[in-house]
Image (spheres, helix red, strand yellow):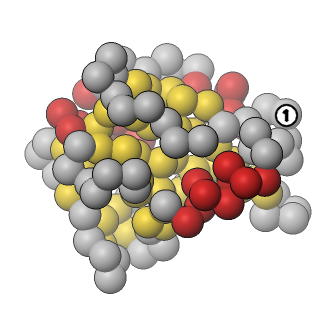
């Protein structure tokens, strides 16, 4: 994947820097652009790392039918509520429990990996 794809990916992202909160049916973002993501609406989750110079930042990009076409909500491990959302994600969606390992190693590589996708997911723009 070239730099062009990465640039397009980040422009389509609604990065959440404030907080995510679990709900009965998914999670909500507490930010200037709030969103409510329902597990039943999620059609793709992409895990990746962002190189932060001295460390890597684990990120998840959620694409859902309830979001505008071509956009996603991105949360990372530094956002309060991330671990609770990941625990619920693992409970509600059929995701390989070893997904973190495939994304975290080797260090300082993006390791972008689709960890969940429904059969009816729209094609990824690339």
Q: Quadrant of residue 90?
A: top left
* Outermost bottom residue: 32
Q: Position of residue 106 (x, y in %)?
A: 85, 34
Is residue 79 something one can see in this rendering?
A: no
- How many discs mark residues in the rendered view? 1
On the rendered structure, is 51 left or right of 102? right
- Quarter of the figure that contains the C terminus: top right
Q: Is residue 8 above or below residue 118?
A: below
Q: Which residue is mark 1?
A: 106
Residue in front for this viewpoint, 52 or 45: 45
On the rendered structure, is 32 left or right of 9? left
Q: Residue at x 29, y 37 (%)?
A: 42
Q: Residue at x 68, y 49 (%)?
A: 5
- Quarter of the figure that contains the N terminus: top right
Tell me the SS state at disc 1: loop
Q: Quadrant of residue 99?
A: top right
Q: Position of residue 114 (x, y in %)?
A: 54, 29
Is residue 80 something one can see in this rendering?
A: yes
Q: Position of residue 12 (x, y in %)?
A: 49, 61
Residue in front for this viewpoint, 83 or 92: 92
On the rendered structure, is 50 left or right of 64? right
Could you classify mark 1 by the number of other residues whose Cα lies within 10 Å: few (under 14), some (14-19), or many (20 or more)? few
Q: Is residue 41 above or below residue 83?
A: above
Q: Residue at x 25, y 63 (%)?
A: 35
Q: Residue at x 87, y 64 (%)?
A: 53
* Outermost left residue: 24
Q: Position of residue 100 (x, y in %)?
A: 61, 31
């Amino acid at each position: 994947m070239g730099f062009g794809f990465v640039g397009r990916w980040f422009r389509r992202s609604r990065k959440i820097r404030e907080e995510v909160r679990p709900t009965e049916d998914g999670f909500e973002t507490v930010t200037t652009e709030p969103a409510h993501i329902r597990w039943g609406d999620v059609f793709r989750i992409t895990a990746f790392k962002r190189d932060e110079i001295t460390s890597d930042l684990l990120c998840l990009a959620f694409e859902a039918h309830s979001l505008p076409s071509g956009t996603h909500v991105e949360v990372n491990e530094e956002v309060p509520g991330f671990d609770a959302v990941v625990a619920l994600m693992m409970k509600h969606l059929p995701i390989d429990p070893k997904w973190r390992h495939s994304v975290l190693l080797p260090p300082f590589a993006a390791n972008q990996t689709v960890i969940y996708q429904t059969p009816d997911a729209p094609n990824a723009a690339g």
